[in-house]
Image: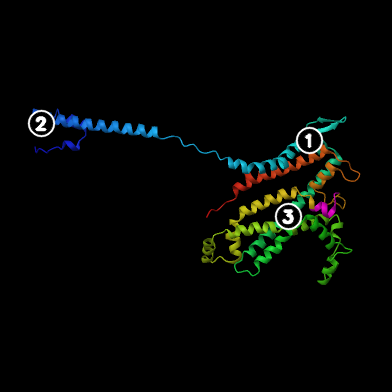
Amino acid sequence: MERRPVSLRRLGVSERLCLLPISPLVGEMPGRAEGGAVARDFANDESRSTGQGQAAMSDATLSRDAIEPVRRSRRWHIVVFLLPAFLVYTAVMILPLIETLRLSLFNTVDGQNTFVGLANFKVLFGDARWAADFWNALKNNVIFFAIHMLVQNPIGVALAAMLSIPRLRFAAFYRTAIFLPTLLSFVIVGFIWKLILSPIWGVSPYLMDLVGLKSLFAPWLGKPGSALIAVSLISVWQYVGIPMMLIYAALLSIPDEVIEAAECDGITGWSQFWKIKLPLVLPAIGIISILTFVGNFNAFDLVYTVQGALAGPDKSTDILGTLLYRTFFGFQLQLGDRSMGATIATVMFLIILAGVTFYLFVVQRRIRRYQF
């Protein structure tokens, strides 16, 4: 059998030790000198490996000792900047809300403020007079909100789509003109539209006569069947600029590469808007919808300016905000009732809270978002 030399330096220390007793099978029996040399090699290798291990352990120990935990400085400036806003918000919003919720559970009994639990809510929903006023106001509020959702927001989306057309002339002027009524005071808007729609000194009959539609004119603010629609459309005219600007900003944030890819596929014009742009701005439309919901169920100022606290004619424009005002502060012969006013405010808060919760946990999770 051919003998092949084995290189001991390629083997580990344990492997070399295993080869010593069986060296006659591998090669010739080493002599004493060779055996001593091999033993010295083993000892040197062992000492070197031991020294390297001890050096590595000492370096690791020194490195662990040298590392100190990094202490992050406390960012007190964040608290300093947030504290004024937090105090103002707490004083203006949180504390009044807590006091309103507390007041709805109390009522005046024998001249003393007494805890009555849910008795005020039973009166609001169970008493014939209170229930009739409340459900009428809630129904009108739902109609008020529906008109904004079906008229204001679609018009805002359409205007934003037209203003986002490239190379549109006078686009800046159109944006300013549409958004300008949003900056006006509701008192000014209400007073101006009362003058415009007045059948006595208003300009509406004259303007409709110029286009041959004077026969269609009617005192819309004075008729129970059309007063709420007229007030809602006035509100739409004033606030249509807000959804327009939000959708316009969302359309401008769409990358040009997406539009160019759609044009390469032959998708242009309104087809491009419905198939490409509209799905990309759905999150913005969702935000506009919830803002419209919150704003309309908190509405009061425009209805009060145009129709007064009684929300006439015959309470046809009465919404939850005007009902709350009359109940809490009183009006004309009606005395104010703080407890019932707080009860109506609490119901308004719960309605808004339910709507916002439904949007955040149901609708928003199903809206597909695209990241570029």
Pointer 2 residue: 34
Q: Nearer the observer, disc 3 or disc 2?
A: 2
73 vs 324, left or right, is left
Q: Earlier in the sequence, mark 2 or mark 1?
A: 2
| Residue found at x 82% / y 51% | 304
Q: Which residues are magenta?
A: 302-309
Front residue (pair 191, 154) = 191
**Callout 2: few (<14), some (14-19), or many (20+) C-alpha neighbours within 10 Å?**
few
* Residue 304 is covered by the magenta coloring: yes
* Magenta-drawn stretch, dominant element (helix, strand or loop): helix
- Give coordinates of residue 121: x percent, y percent: 79, 36
Relative to 309, residue 161 above or below: below
Q: Secondary structure at mark 2?
A: helix
Q: Secondary structure at mark 1?
A: helix
Residue 244: which quarter of the image?
Answer: bottom right
Pointer 1 residue: 103
Relative to 68, residue 154 above or below: below
Q: Nearer the observer, disc 3 or disc 1?
A: 1
Disc assigned to residue 123: none
Q: Secondary structure at mark 3?
A: helix
